[in-house]
Image (spheres, grey):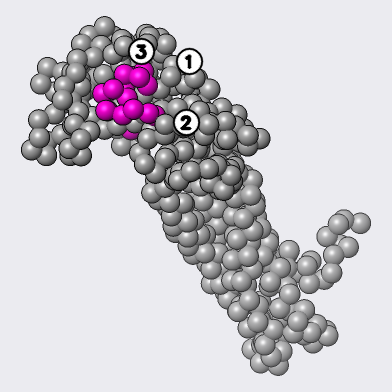
Amino acid sequence: MSITHKLPYEWQVGLRYTRAGKRSGRNSFISFISMASVAGIALGAAALIIVLSVMNGFQKEVTARMLSVLAHVEVFDASGAMPQWQASRQQALRNPEVRAAAPFVETQAMLLSDGVMKPVLLRGVDPGQEASVSDVPEHMREGRFDVIAPGSYNIIIGRALATSLDVGVGERITLLMSSAADGQGVGAGTMPRTRPLTVAGIFEAGHFEFDSTLAFAHIDDASELAGLSAPSGLRLRLADMQRAPAVAAQLQASMSGELFIRDWSKVNAMWFAAVQSQKRMMFIILTMIVAVAAFNLVSTLVMTVRDKQSDIAILRTLGASPRSVMTIFMVQGTLVGVLGALLGVGLGVLVALNIDIIVPFIERSFQVQFLSQEVYLISEIPSELRWADVGWIGGVAVLLAFLATLYPSWSASRVKPAEALRYE
């Protein structure tokens, strides 16, 4: 005995209606609309999975490239300088989740080369400790990071910045900086201080914003250039970067002094907020596509109900209850939704897992580039499939299909046998 014969008769009839035959043009048309609904649900679910996977991958990739340059947590003194940074460093390292801490100096400046001027964030660091709090030393493309010795006035810049200034390793470059005493920026009507520097290395973190605006010098040289007598603060590396907000709160409570502590998510808070907002909007928009396809089932089931009125009347005369009749058409519509969701999930997962192969093939075939590095910070489309998203999308597709069956199924349960059989 087959499995279908063991099912309740409502399920058996619902399955038979789902596989509408081709004995008449009307049945064929109903079957076509049903398959169109399946295809619509499948394409909507697949598009939703692919888009969310790309957005997840984009966020993960950009975050990873940010954190190769940024510290997980930064600690600043409210006075603008941290003379007792060694004591603060020891206090920070007492937290078991803090793996390393290093002092730094940051100041805004301008770099000038052959009449080309670019803004830069000059970061003074200790080259011996920088590798413990960031991955910049690993991203060196030319030169070595340890050449920024105290008193050398060497500078390491990003590849994009080097390209825009048209300079290479060993060439001289001019640093322009406002006086620390006047508190005004370059170009505010004051004469900036200048200092010739030597480009000693070029790094490439893969994040255009940092590669085009960030420069490194020794902390002693940067402090002198900025007119500071002490580091600006500390940069911390944690065991788990996802715990950065919680650890920052712990350090705020445990460390002494008037300190300002921020984690990596606050540094680019607007960017992360924008990505989350875009993900929510894309989920809503693409869910509407699934909803449109799912509610095509309403027309399919309404036509099926009208076509099967004599069948419904016979079932009622044989003792079928209105609830059983309603179940038959709910089974039919829900099976269409399940089939569409399964096909969509399969297609979406397949594309999301192989997008690194599919997208380059399309780009080569049609000679197009989907991402510009200057605009999107990265040049390759990443993808991160999250099974929780897949589950939500599949569940929403089935739920919408189920909701679409309620009205047609309810109308089927209200068919009166005598009126349905009057003209048979």
Tag 1–tag 3 contact (CB < 8 Å): no
Observer-nearest residue: 88 or 143?
A: 88
Mark 2, secondary structure of its residue: helix
Mark 1, secondary structure of its residue: helix
Q: Residue at x 37, y 11 (%)?
A: 149
Q: Position of residue 202 (x, y in %)?
A: 34, 15
| Residue 267 vertical position relative to residue 424 in the rendered view, above or below | above
Determine which of the numbered discs, if any, sits on residue 150 in the image.
Answer: 3
Observer-nearest residue: 2 or 264?
A: 264
Which range is magenta? 209-231
Observer-nearest residue: 342 or 133?
A: 133
Describe residue 54's horizontal placement relative to residue 80 as left or right: right
- Work out whether mark 2 precedes mark 1 in sequence or the reverse, and give the earlier one: 2
Q: Is residue 210 magenta?
A: yes
Q: Position of residue 221 (x, y in %)?
A: 31, 18
Characterize the local packing of mark 3: few (<14), some (14-19) or many (20 or more) Cα atoms within 10 angstroms: some
Q: Quadrant of the N terminus?
A: bottom right
Mark 3, secondary structure of its residue: loop
Q: Amino acid at mark 2?
A: Trp
Determine which of the numbered discs, if any, sits on residue 219 in the image.
Answer: none
Residue position for label 1: 128
Q: Residue at x 73, y 75 (%)?
A: 327
Observer-nearest residue: 354 or 309?
A: 354
- Disc 2 to disc 1, how far (Cα)? 17 Å
Residue position for label 2: 85
1 or 3: mark nearer the eye: 3
Q: Position of residue 183 (x, y in %)?
A: 20, 39
